[in-house]
Amino acid sequence: MNKQDYMNTSVQEPPLDYSFRSIHVTQDLLSEEPRTGLRPLRHSKSGKSMSQSLWLNNNVLNDLRDFNHVVSQLLEHPENLAWIDLSFNDLTSIDPNLRTPKLEWSSVKGQLRLKEEQESPGTWQVSGSDRTQAHTFCPSDHSALSVWCSCTPSKVLTTFFNLSVLYLHGNSIQRLGEVNKLAVLPRLRSLTLHGNPIEEEKGYRAQVGTMSPAIALAFLPLVVTLLVRYRHYFRLLVRTVLLRSLRDCLSGMRIEERAFSYVLTHALPGDPGHILTTLDHWSSHCEYLSHMGPAKGQILMRLVEEKAPACALELGTYCGYSTLLIARALPPGGCLLTVERDPRTAAVAEKLIRLAGFDERTVELIVGRSEEVIPRLRTQYQMNRADLVLLAHRPRCYLRDLQLLEAHALLPAGATVLADHVLFPGAPRFLQYAKSCGRYRCRLHHTGLPDFPAIKDGIAQLTYAGPG
């Protein structure tokens, strides 16, 4: 297997796992057997592992001396190591500390030789300038002179340029300067440092957030890709959450109340069609209303006209947009009961419905939770049957309320149940139940969100066959 094949396939290889082995020094790895997982480790002809992941978490390592040498003995391609887990050890540095050796000038041999070393791990080297400086300050009688020479730090983790995941949480790293060493790793995308003493150091959050341009830039292609791919959802989020919240704070009014104020000054009273058009215009040009919209509205009106229900039920009045659509399409003598749980929203919807010219005999608005209202429909509101039901409140409540309607025998055979937003944000449990219980014939009318046609949604049409 060549290196390219290795890079293409070994990402799927299981990790080389030495966790929870009480390992004190990295040399111990050569005598330890890695943990076995669900998939066996593959090895090259030389007996080395083909993995790109090395897990050393939950041991007692306090330095990484000889780490590179050990890794080269364990892995066939150590340069391709992509994931290292060193969490919950006792490491004090990213790479080993500088070693500061003490040297002695010998006039007999004419060279610097090591006199003593500090205990801190690392490697050192003596340059020519160090020897010249020592000779300059040597006494005339050439007696021994102790000097301190400059040293070069060891590089361990920063030599793995394909490293993308590095776990260092739960160690004893105390200096923020240690973290900056990782800036040289171009592919590093995931770094954990919580549970280290540096968390207590002033400026830790700010510095770690900006400590490595390589880490920050590594996420840039992903962010750009997500913004491009999901740009419509991002725009929807901005309009429905950020801008709406800002306007709510500035105006002291909810979006339904602002929409109704616009309708009062721009729509014709007693004309439901003109009121609906005014709401559509306001949602497209002023603030996004999150209402049903004209595309779904046409589907709803057509289905209501085809069914011609004597009594219809709507769960989720909101601003009253879909209520007006149903009321317009009702046959002569038909009536609609609409349920809204939020009293403040219900007050706006009530005004809109009466402004459109529908009285309480045609449209009756009930304020309350759907799960509390449904059991009382027969006794308190004299609704013995619902020929057509529109579910337009919360998709996660669709299934519960449908089963409540069944349990209280409010759905006659042939009744039509319509459910909005079954694709976005979605009601998968509701659709699964309707398709699998055997009591409904299901059809899905595909459409998009108003002003966001690229975001696919739909209205589910269920025809009730009876209790079976």
Image (cartoon, rainbow, N blue to C red):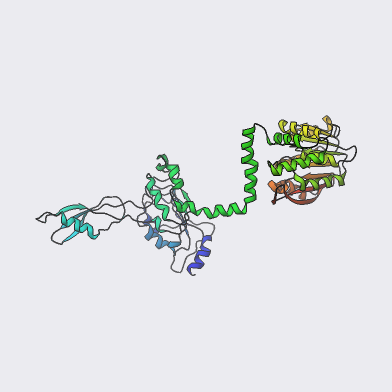
Q: Is residue 180 left or right of residue 13?
A: left
Hey, which residue is sitting farthest right in the picture?
332
User: Residue 365: x, y in percent?
Assistant: 79, 33
Q: Visible in this render: residue 405?
A: no
Q: Visible in this render: residue 80?
A: yes
Q: Quadrant of residue 383?
A: top right
Q: Is residue 46 above or below residue 148?
A: below
> Observer-nearest residue: 437 or 339?
339
Q: Is residue 175 above or below residue 339?
A: below
User: Residue 54: x, y in percent?
Assistant: 45, 56
User: Residue 80: x, y in percent?
Assistant: 46, 62
Hey, which residue is sitting farthest left in the picture?
141
- Number of numbered discs: 0
Q: Residue at x 52, y 56 (%)?
A: 37
User: Residue 63: x, y in percent?
Assistant: 36, 51
> Observer-nearest residue: 248 or 303?
248
Hey, which residue is sitting farthest front in the picture?
266
